[in-house]
Amino acid sequence: MTKKLQKNLYESASIRLQQKRKKLIGNFLKGKEPNFMERYTGILDDYFRESFEKSSAGFKMGIDRNPYVISALGGYGRKEQCIHSDVDFLFLFDKKVPKIAENLIREVVYPLWDIGLDVGYAMRSLKECISLSRQDFNVLTPLLDARFICGMSPLYFRLMEQIRWEVIFKQSQKIIDWLVESNQERHKHFGDSTYLLEPNIKDGQGGLRDYHTMLWIARIKFNLQQAGDLELNEFFSQNDFQSLNHALVFIWNVRNRLHHLTGRKCDQLYFEYQVKLAEALKFNPENDQQPVEKFLGVLHGQMEFIKQLHRIFLHDLRHPRNVNLNKKTSNQQSSIIGLEIKNERLCFTAVQSVLNSPNLLIRIFEESARLKIALSPEARSIVKEYAYLIDEKIRTSAAVLQSFEKILSAPVSNIDVLDEILNLGLLTSLIPEFKMIINRIQYDEYHLYPVDKHLLHTVQSIKNFNTADNAEKEALCYNLYQELKNPKLLLWAALLHDIGKGGTRKNHSRIGAEIAYAIMIKLGYKSEDAETVSFLIKEHLLLIKTASRRDINDEETAIFCARKIKNIGLLKMLYLLTVADSLSTGPKAWNEWTSALLRDLFLKTLSILENGELATNEAVVIIENKKNQILSSTAASQNKNDLEALFNLMSPRYILYTPTVEILEHISLYKNLSGKDFTWTITKNPNSNTRTVKICAKDHPGLFSKIAGVFTLNGLDILEAQVYTWRNNIALDILEVTPPPDQIFEDKRWEQTASDLSSALAGELDLTVALNKKITASKSLKILAPERPCRVVVDNKSSSFFTIIEVFAYDFPGLLFGITDALFSCGLDIWIAKIATKVEQVVDVFYVRDFDGQKVDAPESIAAIEAAIFKVISRPIT
């Protein structure tokens, strides 16, 4: 046979494969190919068999002289071949691999590469396979899934036999330990997919690799061959195994469609593909939920199920099953009639016990929390199947409430009992209002977790406040928790604080408060306790919104909070709920800077509730005392008259809310100004990864907007700003900013920033042009669909001295510069600015006055301000 003819034969085989693959994928995308992976595996098998039969290299080698096998590995071996998964296979030779075998690669592998498939292959002798499997378990795991395709089948069976007896049998525990450890490392790297909005559906916790790990361990330890053996050998109940198959089918469907959308092997469910996947999977809007939110809710539910099965499987691995399954092996025993412990697991003595006493469905979890023992697979199935027995009479009984309270307040342990109650459907039987938030997703990057998981995380965070570890890390929260008279009410508020998100996106705090009050009354709580929980839920955003959007140095802010909360006990609970809520939302909701703001607001509000509001006479005394301290300081030793004259140029507000030591720093900064346009100091904050920048400058028109533009140009985000102007036309801008992206070269970045600010103040740097270039060059701009509308709120009620302007917009480089420049163009001075980036949407808050020092309350002026800001924030973002 000529080389040309031989090449044509292989090309025709690969072209047929390509055509079949294209047709198969098309049918799958139309929903006409339910067994896609198995069918795809089949056409790949056909290609290898045809290639084997027509192989010129194989003919020359002589299969009788050089027996060899083509064997599928990994996902291809398991018949889980996805659209863009690697095609992994092995050329296995009995003896030494002959040199001519290299031609097999040209004949078999090259045509697959030519049609765009990713191929992973190995060419080894039987001896090499065994040797490498002993040395490197990464080589072993694909061989655990090996499947015969074509060639000398006795050689394949010899491989599998030797793998079992010469590798697995001799090192089984070592291999299993390695798999478990690798799993833990993988989970650390990819995260818990059941809690992430961009989950890795293969390698994250709850992903496909958790299922594969269970299969591998079952094959190693128990010689189980098929997935169905997990049910036959009672690792999982029949219901659990059916649910597992259902979850796998859904995730594989998602994975294949994700591969098609991305045009490559991709297992990270990035935001940009989620809406398209929801459409492809035909999810429809329902109950104020977008299709993409419903899709993500289902996906999280399926991955949660796999995660739980994987956890149970590993528990059974640590506590091996006994030959006598009825033997009671634990020293601990349940004191509750109808429950027992077998094989280190809690069980029902019989199904009839549950039918006779449905209370056992909740009491078994009470025991689980007390004894720190998980439920057996059979018990979990019984709970899931008979949860419907919890009717109105049972759920409102004193006994069930007492059991649930014990679970709710149980100390943190390695068994999350509340999570188990949720996963098995019992929580919705106990609190039917929970149904509307199960796996409910809030489609933004701000909330990392589904609503139901977020609520459980919040409860867990509050219980963590009461641990010894937290006493050192967060002493304030620990101490406040110890002072609570009734912590159970705080835990109830944590469990129910977002219950109002079940049917609406608006006023969820108010709606949730009403729902929670009704739940508490129905469960038999006193009206004052129900009112406490209701208040905490209604106001659970009060402190964090106030801290991030209002001037907490202004006594009016703390007075506003104190008048609303009224009670010291309520304030302490509200603070703990706010911290726990933020911690459980995600890193963009909680950081050192947010923590510091919230703590300051809490302490100032607490002081007012304990000591009363600051009287005007007291303010006069404070100012006079500060004046005396400054005039008696070393700074006054040279020229006391000059210092007194300078003090008289400072505004009362500045003196009142600025510590004496900082006023002295500002005086020193002013003395260094001399003939320069500005001077500054930059301080690293020990309690948060931020920088305090104190700028003293000759007041320029639009000074703050220029500072904002220059900082944006240099990658420095302003978090908060206090702007003061002395009566001698000197401006003090106190900024809290993020550090430069590359902190190794931080000094150089600050030098460049200083140079740019000098140029901008001198009129040599056109910030509009420079920032437009930065916007054009940026590749990270994206907006999650659907967009929330931009808003501008002008508030003349919250402050006696300032008009407060809130701007809700989508972030882009130069946004802060644009807004502040617009405010300057409207004749407004910015006195305070608070910048809160909430994912792509930011909330920028400005305390302003007009150039005459007055609030802006004329309707036409407000309309002009809104129009100017909207012109900036409505710019198109690409």
Image: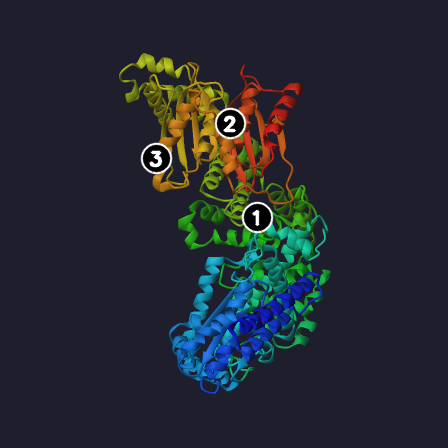
The residue shown at (54%, 34%) is 549
The answer for how far apart the CA atoms under marks 3 and 1 are is 36 Å
Q: Position of residue 670 (x, y in %)?
A: 35, 20
Which one is closest to the eye, mark 2 or mark 1? 2
Instruction: Give amino acid for label 2.
Output: Thr
Q: Name the residue under label 1.
A: 447
What residue do we see at 37% from left, 41% from top? Answer: 743
Task: Single out the mark in the foreground, 3 or 2.
Answer: 2
Q: Where is residue 502 in the image (x, y as percent from the top left)?
A: 68, 50
Q: Where is mark 2, residue-wise?
A: 768
Query: Quadrant location of residue 469?
Result: bottom left
Choose between 337 and 124: the one closer to the eye.
Answer: 124
Circles 3 and 2: CB distance less than 8 Å? no
Precedes in sequence: disc 3 or disc 2: 3
Residue under numbered circle 3: 748
For marks 2 and 1, give the CA distance. 34 Å
Residue 190 point in image, percent of width and height: 49, 58
Identify which amino acid the numbered label 3 is placed on: Lys
The location of residue 431, given as percent across then percent down, is 67, 57
Mark 1 secondary-structure assignment: loop
Q: Which of marks 2 and 1 is nearer the N terminus?
A: 1
For label 1, count other residues whose C-alpha is less than 10 Å away and answer few (under 14), some (14-19) or many (20+): many
Kindly state the secondary structure of the residue where label 3 is placed: helix
Q: Is residue 621 left or right of residue 515?
A: left
Q: In which quarter of the image is the C terminus?
A: top right
Dot 3 surroundings within 10 Å: few (below 14), some, or many (20 or more)?
few
Q: Residue 329 carries which label?
A: none
Observer-nearest residue: 487 or 43? 43
Viewer-nearest residue: 298 or 25: 25
